[in-house]
Amino acid sequence: MKYIIIWCFVWAVVSNTFAQTLTAKQNEKGLYGFADETGNFTIKPKYDKIHSDFYKGVACVVKGKKYVFINTSGKEISKSYSWASYFGDNDLCLVNTGGKLDEEGNLTKGKYGYVDLNGDERIAVRYARIGDFNEQGIALINEGGSINKDGDFEGGKNGFVHTSGEILISPKYTHVGEFTENGFAWVNIGGKYDDSENLIGGKFGYVDRYGIEIIEPKYDFIGPIGEDGICWGNRGGKIFKSDKKIESQLKVYAKKEKDKTKIIAKREELENKLTGGMCDVLRNKIQGGKNGFIDSKGREITKFIYDKASNFCNGAARVMLINKKKEAFGFVNRQGKEITKIEYAEVGEFQNGFTYVKTFPIYNKKKKINIPSKYGFIDKTGKPLTESKYTWIGKISEGIVACRNEQGFGYINNTGREIVPFILQDAKPFQEGIAFIKLPSPFFSKNQIGKPLSAFISYPWVDRIKSLGKADLLKNDTIAALVNFSSEGRYGAIDSNGIVLINFQYSDADKFTNNVAPVKSIKWGCINKNGETIIDCKYEEVRTTFDNQIIGVKNNSFWGGIDLKGKVIIPIEFDLFEDFSNMLQDYIKKGRETISARTMEIYRIHKKNLTEHFNIISTIPNEYWDY
């Protein structure tokens, strides 16, 4: 027995070595076979073509326009097929029976399946189409579909198969989407595409990357499954197509605004307002019906009661209910629990563990006054971090948000703490740990670097000034100057602790990008985080770009690009910043070669032709445009 095992092992090694040395060879009659290292045929030349060399002891040959698999002894180990692909890492080869190649070399008709290294049909040759296997060994299969006159595959039913040959889901879906990065694909039963490529009707659900149906197809629309493993579903809704009110508003807007890009953006704004920005997995805008949430195990974690719902973001999803024609918003958590009352006029998305909520305006009957809407902040459990007392808020950036109250601008962090006194004339968003703020002239001197704002701004002092009457102010020129908050202020910069990093000396400023920020004295230039001037303030406008070596500058109404030393890299000849930006992209793609005079001449010709073109089309009345 011992010797038999040893002999089998030796024979396996010899056979494998032998298979690796076999190479395709053609004889004088034009037929192919396989020869060993000496050039002698070990498999007789009787094939019209060698489709693939030996792979793990198996090769594919063509004989009389038929593909067949053979082993190293030349024995045919499979049926004959109309076409074959090549063995992949999963040791399977896609084959087709009954198919034909069209003029472009594409295989049409026929049935597909997979053959293994034994020549057996691991997956029966019976499907109209089989997709590629994913990392989990799952592939899409289709029965009954065909290629239409436009060359697109359509129709039939879809299911899923494993590389083992096991049919995980028998073909039953009318449509199947692509698998997303988090491993889910939407499925639809009964839907049809209209002329605008909208998938109309049918029911939606989901399968996972393992070919398991995790959400039964029973929803009219369904949202994408997010990182939380939850999606929203809709019952009774319809695809939003057009609205007479929107069209009417757009006509009025288009008479004042000639820029087509802005008109399209306005349409998007109006449509989002009407639909709540709700889009299904196919990016169709949804209107009407009731919405709820489903987890990745197919469980409905909320009732389907909401008029609008959003995707989950950082552990919570926004929901909306319509009550007496008033749209009220709130939040639902991963467990399907409402963490706030559905009572706000507006709510944001959670970032850094907090977000804003906006109250509705209230009429005080006793005082007979209107109390306007105010903003406040809550944490991810729905607990209030601040009172609703802010009249304006900016975007949350780096865990800090600029706000405004009755006194002025300031900032709060994600704990609800006001990090600077609310006496600023302006507050820009934080970026790269720095934000530009604007102070009225009474509150700054030549050098405040390293000092906290609270060291030279105090609420009692400010309140005292504000409490003085006009007559008292006129008696004291110093106080009169201090209280003049409408006077010209200056911008400087602070860190997230309210420490001054850059003195208050600029009439305007923009955020830092790659250690560079545009600032304005009389004209625009740039500084670094140390407050050092790196581009002199001599331009009409300055913008940082996606490239940290080139700055966009505007001079004499034209845009161009300079480096951080002020050298012109891209000629200042472009009418629009976007045109300059496109040239910048091309410059980088070409290895930062100097832009030639010929390139600029082409641009000038193109600009001239484009100008003439728009001069012609501008004479066409607005009602003829398809916005």
Image: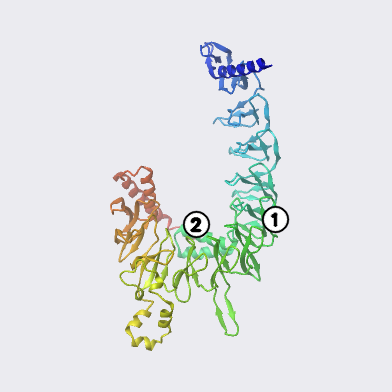
Q: In the figure, residue 286 lies in which quadrant?
A: bottom right
Where 562 sits versus 327, above or below?
above
Q: Residue at x 70, y 35 (%)?
A: 166
Kind of residue sitting beneath label 1 = Glu
Q: Residue at x 57, y 75 (%)?
A: 361
Q: Nearer the viewer, residue 16 or 245?
A: 16
Q: Which residue is mark 2?
A: 625
Q: Position of residue 106 (x, y in %)?
A: 57, 31
The disc placed on residue 610 is none
Q: Quadrant of the N terminus?
A: top right
* Residue 26 as seen in the image, left or right of residue 540: right
Q: Position of residue 320 (x, y in %)?
A: 63, 64
Q: Nearer the viewer, residue 339 or 519?
A: 339
Can you tell which of label 1 and label 2 is closer to the viewer? 1
Where 351 sits versus 110, above or below?
below
Q: Position of residue 34 (x, y in %)?
A: 56, 15
Kind of residue sitting beneath label 2 = Trp
* Residue 282 as seen in the image, left or right of residue 297: left
Q: In the figure, residue 433 lies in which quadrant?
A: bottom left
Q: Residue furthest front?
A: 2
Q: Nearer the viewer, residue 15 or 158?
A: 15
Under circle 1, the secondary element is loop
Where 108 sits versus 545, above or below?
above
C-alpha distance separating marks 1 and 2: 45 Å
Under circle 2, the secondary element is loop
Q: Position of residue 276 (x, y in %)?
A: 59, 61
Disc 1: CA contacts within 10 A as few (<14), some (14-19) or many (>=20) = some
Q: Nearer the viewer, residue 466 or 221?
A: 466
**Label 1 vs 2, first from the N-terminus:** 1
Q: Which residue is mark 1?
A: 300
